[in-house]
Image (tube, rainbow, N blue to C red):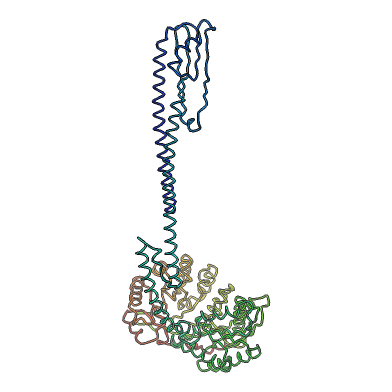
């Protein structure tokens, strides 16, 4: 409650209490005087206890000494002597007097009859009510005077505070008008002085910040790897071209660098940055004759180019040039593809959501057309999920054709007593033999509820290759999705397959992402127990990203944990990561769990990990992924 209202309430309570006290005091005085009246009457009637005769004579006898409101004499033997005078209920002289009204009644037995009286106290009642009325005027007059004075002072204070608040708001609005000291006197002078100093200090700091901001603005809105504008810049441009009544028309290119994850895994993060930089240079080359083209990096692996005032036919020719440049780059690096391009036009009736939905659809379709393909999507057809629907068809087709190939990346053990394994990396291809982006295939399979079918394809093909290629020895790691691993029907199917091939099952290590397993610990425990029952092993990859990692591997007991590369890369210069990794290694060793470092990219990190007695190392510096070499029988089967 505001202070002013609280003070008014307190005043009201205090003066109400004074009113009650004043009333009680006057009531006590009135009761005392009423008692005196009654005692006087009792003294007078006592003199007439032997009275016999008419009641009117008795009334005349006592009237000079006693003021009666009501008088009634009832003779015991002769009703002619009866006499009644006055009324039982008297009218109060005023409304306030009625508050003090009291009943002074008495019944007395005489020698020959009974006398009932009610004494009149009108004079003292009027006096008491008048006195109480005067006190009320004084009390509530004082209340009114104090309230008005306080209201005036409060209003004046609010005026000063409002002025101070307006000056504080001016500071927030970076306005530094002079403060009128004449308005802020007495106690407010300290605040006025403080505000003046704050204005001066803030103005100096803002000037300094503006200078610093000018220096940093380019860095803040420019991607350091590609030199393109950032997502924030793209959002501003998107809002601009999608404003109502804007007259700009043009085309939007979305380029998805689908092989960034593969490049990072094959050649490390520096290689990934080189890959992104090369894509940026290819885009600059393709748009070299378009001075109005605006380039943006809108996410880790996505680029956007806004090309105003160019028709769709010309933009399609540019997309074809980009594809050609990507094809040449692909031949140099040997990846499945470089990037895919979606092209959509925008015009006066475009809105941001529809435009980006259209662009996402175009890129999704381009990814199903083969390496480095582009697709033009001119307008929404009412089927905005068309691109994803094509992915569902494409995934169904590759499952039917068993279109999966394997690359292999070894894990180097750090000690002779440690048994390590080689990880199989799955790659998928279309009916023309062109590879799909692996990460997109996995993501789309999960989105369409087809991850189990993909995982079954990988498992069956891997087992078949191991059966037909005796030269492939040692433990082999197979990646499956957490979505499949936490479903009992899939686990039951997998166990039955492994029971049929127990000698192969004992060589398999199933890798599952930690984040997907932590959401269902009971299902994870069941998955690991079932695989252990047939001799297979389990490795939890990307370990350390979850908040319950220690509790997780302590309860479910996997055979291997693969540290997320964010903990191992640059560990030579990060003492906090070293502490965290050392703690994991110590706990895991007590539980007989092997710890593998991933993303090892240089000699310094490798040496540090070896000194920490880690069990295994994996990464570009250790060994690059290579195509799995098959025996002749397996090749013919493939």
Residue displayed at 50% across by 28% down: 92
| The quadrant where residue 440 appears | bottom right
| Near-viewer residue (66 or 385) | 66
> Does residue 395 appear in the picture of this structure?
no
Farthest residue to the right: give it: 381
Coordinates of residue 63 in the picture (x, y in percent): 46, 15
Task: Residue 397 in the image: state x and y as whole percent.
Answer: 62, 80
| Residue 143 falls in image quadrant | top left
**Total numbered badges shown on the rendered structure:** 0
Compare residues 91 and 505 and report the one nearer the observer: 91
Q: Is residue 177 visible?
A: yes
Q: Position of residue 230 (x, y in %)?
A: 50, 82
* Residue 44 horizontal side relative to residue 252, left or right: left
Q: Quadrant of residue 346?
A: bottom right
Q: Position of residue 555 (x, y in %)?
A: 41, 66
Q: Quadrant of the C terminus?
A: bottom right
The image shows residue 113, relative to residue 473, as above or below, that is above
- Which residue lies most toward the front here? 64
314 or 387, which lies in front?
314
Q: Is residue 61 above or below residue 471?
A: above
Residue 447, above or below 128: below
Locate residue 189 relative to residue 159 in the image: left or right.
Answer: left
Front position in the image: 90 or 362: 90
């Amino acid at each position: 409650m505001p202070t002013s209202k609280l003070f008014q309430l307190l005043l009201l309570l205090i003066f109400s209490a004074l009113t009650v006290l004043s009333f009680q005091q006057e009531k006590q005085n009135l009761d005392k005087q009423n008692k005196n009246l009654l005692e006087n009457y009792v003294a007078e009637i006592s003199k007439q206890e032997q009275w016999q005769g008419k009641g009117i004579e008795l009334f005349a006898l006592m009237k000079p000494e006693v003021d009666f409101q009501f008088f009634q004499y009832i003779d015991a033997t002769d009703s002619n002597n009866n006499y009644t005078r006055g009324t039982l209920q008297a009218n109060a002289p005023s409304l306030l007097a009625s508050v003090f009204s009291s009943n002074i009644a008495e019944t007395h037995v005489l020698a020959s009859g009974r006398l009932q009286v009610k004494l009149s106290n009108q004079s003292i009642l009027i006096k008491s009510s008048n006195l109480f009325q005067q006190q009320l005027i004084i009390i509530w007059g004082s209340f009114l005077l104090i309230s008005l004075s306080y209201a005036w002072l409060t209003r004046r204070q609010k005026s000063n505070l409002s002025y101070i608040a307006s000056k504080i708001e001016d500071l927030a609005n970076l306005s530094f008008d002079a403060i009128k000291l004449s308005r802020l006197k007495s106690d407010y002078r300290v605040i006025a002085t403080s505000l003046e100093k704050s204005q001066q200090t803030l103005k100096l700091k803002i000037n300094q910040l503006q200078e610093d901001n000018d220096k940093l603005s380019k860095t803040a809105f420019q991607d350091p790897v590609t030199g393109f504008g950032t997502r924030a810049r793209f959002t501003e441009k998107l809002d601009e071209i999608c404003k109502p009544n804007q007259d700009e028309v043009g085309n939007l290119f979305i380029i998805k660098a689908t092989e960034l994850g593969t490049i990072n895994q094959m050649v490390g993060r520096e290689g990934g940055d080189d890959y992104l930089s090369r894509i940026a240079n290819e885009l600059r080359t393709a748009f070299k004759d378009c001075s109005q083209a605006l380039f943006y990096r809108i996410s880790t692996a996505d680029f956007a180019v806004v090309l105003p005032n160019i028709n769709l036919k010309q933009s399609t020719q540019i997309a074809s040039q980009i594809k050609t440049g990507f094809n040449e780059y692909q031949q140099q690096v040997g990846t499945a593809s470089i990037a895919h391009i979606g092209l959509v036009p925008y015009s006066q009736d475009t809105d941001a959501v529809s435009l980006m939905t259209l662009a996402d659809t175009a890129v999704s379709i381009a990814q199903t057309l083969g390496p480095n393909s582009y697709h033009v999507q001119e307008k929404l057809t009412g089927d905005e999920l068309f691109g994803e629907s094509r992915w569902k068809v494409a995934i169904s087709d590759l499952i039917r054709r068993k279109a999966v190939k394997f690359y292999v990346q070894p894990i180097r053990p750090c000690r002779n007593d440690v048994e390590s394994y080689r990880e199989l990396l799955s790659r998928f291809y279309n009916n023309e033999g062109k590879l799909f982006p692996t990460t997109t295939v996995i993501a789309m399979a999960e989105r369409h509820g087809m991850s189990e079918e993909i995982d079954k394809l990988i498992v069956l093909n891997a087992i078949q290759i191991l059966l037909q290629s005796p030269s492939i020895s040692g433990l082999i790691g197979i990646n499956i999705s957490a979505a499949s691993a936490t479903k009992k029907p899939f686990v039951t199917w997998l166990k039955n397959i492994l029971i049929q091939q127990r000698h192969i099952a004992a060589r398999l290590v199933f890798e599952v992402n930690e984040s997907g397993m932590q959401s269902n610990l009971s299902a994870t425990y069941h998955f690991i127990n079932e695989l252990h029952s047939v001799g297979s092993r389990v490795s939890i990859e990307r370990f350390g990203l979850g908040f319950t990692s220690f509790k997780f591997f302590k309860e479910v007991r996997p055979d291997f944990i693969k540290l997320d590369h964010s903990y191992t890369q640059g560990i030579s210069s990060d003492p906090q990561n070293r502490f965290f990794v050392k703690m994991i290694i110590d706990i895991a060793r007590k539980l007989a769990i092997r710890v593998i470092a991933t993303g090892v990219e240089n000699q310094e990190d490798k040496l540090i990990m070896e000194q920490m007695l880690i069990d295994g190392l994996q990464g570009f510096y250790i060994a690059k992924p290579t195509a799995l070499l098959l025996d002749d029988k397996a090749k013919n089967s493939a």
